[in-house]
Structures are given as C-alpha cells and as structure tokens.
Image (cartoon, rainbow, N blue to C red):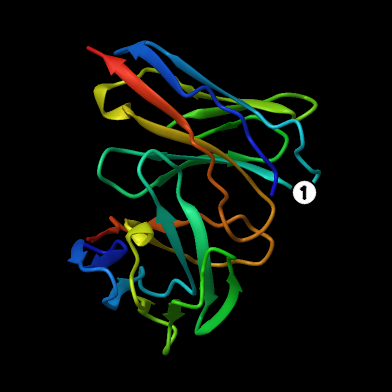
Amino acid sequence: DAKTTQPNSMESNEEEPVHLPCNHSTISGTDYIHWYRQLPSQGPEYVIHGLTSNVNNRMASLAIAEDRKSSTLILHRATLRDAAVYYCILRGAQKLVFGQGTRLTINP
Amino acid sequence: DTGVSQDPRHKITKRGQNVTFRCDPISEHNRLYWYRQTLGQGPEFLTYFQNEAQLEKSRLLSDRFSAERPKGSFSTLEIQRTEQGDSAMYLCASSLERLAIQETQYFGPGTRLLVL
C-alpha cells in the first residue's frame, strides 16, 4: 500500500488559514488522494479527494503538486470545530489505508 | 438519524470471552467496511463486504475474528477467545459503490472494546 508522510502535529489560530502538508512520493498513476478527519471521540469523516487537479468544496481545498508527489489540504478559515486529526490517504482500491495523521490544534 | 450506527458503543469483557458487535449501515449502501483503531494510531482495515459477499480480508483478521453480512444490510463482527491485544475501537463504515467513482466512506461512532 502506498505510503504518506504527514507532520505529527500542527497548531493554528482561529479564523486564520491552515495548510496541512502531505508527502506521497511513491504514489502511482491510479492512486487518488483522499483526506479524512477525525474529531475527538468520533469516527473519521470525509473531507475531500482529488487525482491531479486542485479541488474545492465547502469544507476545504486540495492543492496537488504537478508531479503528484505531495499535496496540501487548505482550511481557508479555521474554527475551533476544525480541531481534529487529519489523515492523508492514497486510495487505489476499495479500502482506506490510514497513516498516523496530523493532529491540528486551533487556538481561540 | 440516518447515519451509520454501531452497537454497543462500549464493551468490557474478560480475556477468553467471545464478543459480537453490530453495524447498521446507511440504508441502500452496498459496501460495508470494518476497521480497527488502537490508541494514537490511525484506523486499520479489517474487511469489507459488497452486499453480502465478503470480498477482502486483512491479515489482521485472525481466525478468531469473523464477520458476516447475511442479508446485505447490517453486519456483525465476532471476536472469539478475546485477548488483551484485541482492546481497540472497532469502526464500521458504509458506502454506495458506483462504477469507477471513488465513493465516500461514512463512518459510525465505533465500538470501544476493553479486554481485561
């Protein structure tokens, strides 16, 4: 299974943008890049996914490097409710292969 | 609430006992997944079903573990002769598979198992 590398933790302030990086140098041509997040005491929830082009939805934006070896999840204006563990996942098949993720702390 | 539900939410058992967990997916979702999550780690895939067929099992799923989805709706995960190492959060997810589209998996709140 393809592997991703994320910082263990990041910290940001409320109402500021947050850029969460992910490295995936062994990505294959058919792997999609998915992001899920897990709030305290909850199951993971889908955030966004993409293949080659940058993607936007109501929750976040996903910026994918031209060589696809890295990507960045962008939260445009963080709130306290965005404090969670964020997982970057390469998905080539049905199952999700989670790493350890980045624990995001939001300061009021 | 029309999300994925899991029962029980918490289970404490003694080593050697059998336990069974239930997952009710979102209605009409044809795929159902089981994951396990230990403290401080990301979830690990255990197995998944498409309708009632179990299509993939992880090597983590030892012979003490069995999962079923008899009518293609709810699923059960049974652990026989529990060991302390089985203590974890067991997560269920469901999705609606569409050909060649990366479908979203919707997770339940999990069942937290503690084996004493």
* Residue that badge 1 annotates: A30
Q: Is B83 on the left or on the right of A1, as rendered?
A: left
Foreground pick, B16 / A43: B16
Quarter assignment of residue B91: bottom left
Q: In the picture shown, does residue B11 fall above or below A33? A: below
**In the image: residue A31, left or right of residue B37:** right
In the figure, A87 relative to B92: above or below?
above
Q: Residue at x 54, y 40 (%)?
A: A99
In the drawing, does residue A66 fall left or right of residue B90? Answer: right
Quadrant showing the C terminus of chain A = top left
The reply to whether residue B26 is visible in this rendering is yes
Image location of residue B45, percent across then percent down: 52, 58
Residue pictured at 34% horizontal, 76% vertical: B81
Give how far across and how far down residue A49 sits, in percent. 58, 41
Q: Is residue A58 visible?
A: no
Q: Decide if residue B1 is on the left or right side of residue B29.
A: left
